[in-house]
Image (spheres, rainbow, N blue to C red):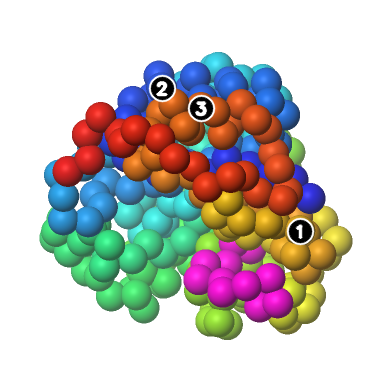
């Protein structure tokens, strides 16, 4: 089982340079992965929020071996042609370390659809995401892409260069653990990142229901202070340690410097972030 740092790019963590420094520390401390949230708005407060792609580019340049990626991007917010270019560029910059986490997004946490004039309808989002999921692997081959769908059209376009990873960048699909559709989508790709999992027993049931190949990844979110051994025993291949910016940069740095701990860390305490409004 591998362990990763998982950070929301809020408040002090909205600065790509700060996050890149934390990623370098994570690599030195032998963490296996470094993943970031992808949001343009969160809650009702006027929080500082960083851009996931610019931040990950900085992370790629400050590290050499740790896996990295957005965890997760809301696919319907993206144009597939731009996303194909972004993913390949980051995969080349990181020399094949990108893992793409992908889901539908949710309007309820910050109005990231409705406040920008877009439909928050989840069924529409699922249809858009399904189109993009079919376009990306085709674009990564370097062959001409022909796609005429309800939401997107690509008429005989080649996307070059191709990714560093061959034949394709790994995709982990995120979704509600109890819903069948995310599991079906995940089975077509490389991993499943179930959300709203209550405990390791429920996580084990998800793995049994999924029944994918031995190389398929199952990622579990675990709070920084909680024991992850039960998730390892349940079959998780990755643990994503959720670190909230509210504990402040000194505490975040200390946690990362200590390296992965399956049994968890003492509950972090520290001065607040310099801007929490």
Judge depth for marks 2 and 1 and give the one in front: 1
Q: Depth check: 251 or 130 in front?
A: 251
Residue 159 appears anywhere in the view: no
Position above or below: 255 against 8: above
132 in the magenta segment: no
- Disc 3 secondary structure class: helix
Give the labeled residue for mark 2: 18
What secondary structure is marked by label 2? helix
- Residue 181 visible? The answer is yes
Total numbered labels: 3
Q: Which residue is mark 1?
A: 229
Q: Which residues are magenta?
A: 192-203
Instruction: Give whichever of 94, 20 is nearer the camera.
Output: 20
Q: Earlier in the sequence, mark 2 or mark 1?
A: 2
Residue 135 or 100: which is nearer the viewer? Answer: 100
Decide: few, some or many residues near mark 3? Use Cα within 10 Å; few <14, some 14-19, many ≥20: some
Give the label on residue 253, or none: 3
Looking at the image, which is closer to me, 42 or 72?
42
Q: Could you classify mark 2 by the number of other residues whose Cα lies within 10 Å: few (under 14), some (14-19), or many (20 or more)?
A: some
- The C terminus, quarter of image: top left
**Alpha carbons under labels 2 and 1: distance apart:** 30 Å
Picture coordinates of residue 179, whole percent (x, y):
53, 81
Chain-order first, disc 3 or disc 1: 1
């Amino acid at each position: 089982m591998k362990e990763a740092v998982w950070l929301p790019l809020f408040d002090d963590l909205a600065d790509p340079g700060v996050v890149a420094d934390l990623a370098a520390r994570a690599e030195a401390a032998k963490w296996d992965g470094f993943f970031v949230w992808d949001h343009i708005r969160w809650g009702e407060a006027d929080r500082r929020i960083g851009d996931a792609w610019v931040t990950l580019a900085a992370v790629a340049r400050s590290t050499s071996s740790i896996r990295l990626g957005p965890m997760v991007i809301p696919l319907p917010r993206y144009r597939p042609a731009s996303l194909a270019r972004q993913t390949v560029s980051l995969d080349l910059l990181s020399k094949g370390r990108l893992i793409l986490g992908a889901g539908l997004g949710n309007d309820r946490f910050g109005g990231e659809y409705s406040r920008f004039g877009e439909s928050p309808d989840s069924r529409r989002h699922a249809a858009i995401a399904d189109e993009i999921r079919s376009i990306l692997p085709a674009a990564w081959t370097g062959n001409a892409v022909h796609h005429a769908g309800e939401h997107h059209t690509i008429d005989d376009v080649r996307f070059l260069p191709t990714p560093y990873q061959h034949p394709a960048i790994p995709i982990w699909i995120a979704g509600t653990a109890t819903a069948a559709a995310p599991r079906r989508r995940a089975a077509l790709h490389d991993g499943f990142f179930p959300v709203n999992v209550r405990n390791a027993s429920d996580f084990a049931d998800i793995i049994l229901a999924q029944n994918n190949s031995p190389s398929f990844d199952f990622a579990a979110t675990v709070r920084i202070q909680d024991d992850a051994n039960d998730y390892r025993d349940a079959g998780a291949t990755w643990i994503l340690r959720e670190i909230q910016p509210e504990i402040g940069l000194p505490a975040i740095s200390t946690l990362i410097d200590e390296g992965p701990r399956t049994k968890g860390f003492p509950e972090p305490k520290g001065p607040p972030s310099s801007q929490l409004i």
